[in-house]
Image (cartoon, rainbow, N blue to C red):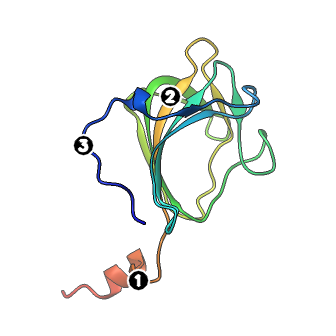
Amino acid sequence: MPKPELEFTPVEAFPLVPSSDTATLASVRTLSHDPETKDATIILYHAPGQQWGGAEGKETPAVHEYWEEVLILKGRLYDKTLGKWFGEKQYCCRPPGMVHGPWIADETQGCEEIVFIRHETRSSPSSTEISNNRKV
């Protein structure tokens, strides 16, 4: 079943799943999810001072097998690897395999971000295939 067709809806209408460990895990609000492709649109709520990273823990970078686009809605986060703060209205696009993080949410504001997750399918051409098939 694909993502549902949905007209404008208050975000609060979607259940907020609180974190069981606010020191390392974000609370999550799932806006849409396709169980077949695992594509999803979610809002992550990082508590003030929260630290998070990859699968091995909050001090390790993250890497995954899907496309991830992130827009910071409120607050800010600090990327420990890059040594930079990123805040409201800043956006990133991460392809599969891109190493990123770990992070710390702002000590007073925390960080709220919308995340778009898209898994590549066999029927979707890769960026290499697209560029190789361009007619010049």
Callout 1 secondary element: loop
Left or right of residue 123: residue 51: right
**First reached walking from the N terminus: tag 1 or tag 2:** 2
Residue underneath mark 3: 7
- In the picture, which quadrant includes the C terminus? bottom left
**Residue extending farthest left:** 136
Confirm or deny contact between disc 3 and disc 2 (CB under 8 A). no
In the image, is residue 4 above or below residue 11? Answer: below
Please state the horizontal and vertical placement of residue 125, each as a whole percent of the image. 38, 81
Give the distance between the C-alpha atoms of the residues marked 3 and 1, in whole angstroms. 28 Å
Dot label at residue 112:
2
Dot label at residue 85:
none
Q: Nearer the viewer, residue 102 or 34?
A: 34
Q: Nearer the viewer, residue 57 or 85?
A: 57
Left or right of residue 23: residue 92: left
Left or right of residue 7: residue 60: right
Q: Amino acid at mark 1?
A: Ser
Q: Amino acid at mark 3?
A: Glu
Q: Amino acid at mark 2?
A: Glu
Is disc 1 surrounded by few (<14), some (14 to 19) or many (20+) residues within 10 Å? few
Is disc 2 surrounded by few (<14), some (14 to 19) or many (20+) residues within 10 Å? many
Please state the horizontal and vertical placement of residue 8, each as a whole percent of the image. 25, 37
Residue underneath mark 1: 123
Give the distance between the C-alpha atoms of the residues marked 3 and 2, in whole angstroms. 22 Å
Residue in the picture at 63% in, 60% down:
64
Callout 2 secondary element: strand
Confirm or deny contact between disc 3 and disc 1 (CB under 8 A). no
In the image, is residue 70 above or below residue 95? Answer: above
**First reached walking from the N terminus: tag 3 or tag 2:** 3
Please state the horizontal and vertical placement of residue 55, each as a whole percent of the image. 75, 51
Callout 3 secondary element: loop
Confirm or deny contact between disc 1 and disc 2 (CB under 8 A). no
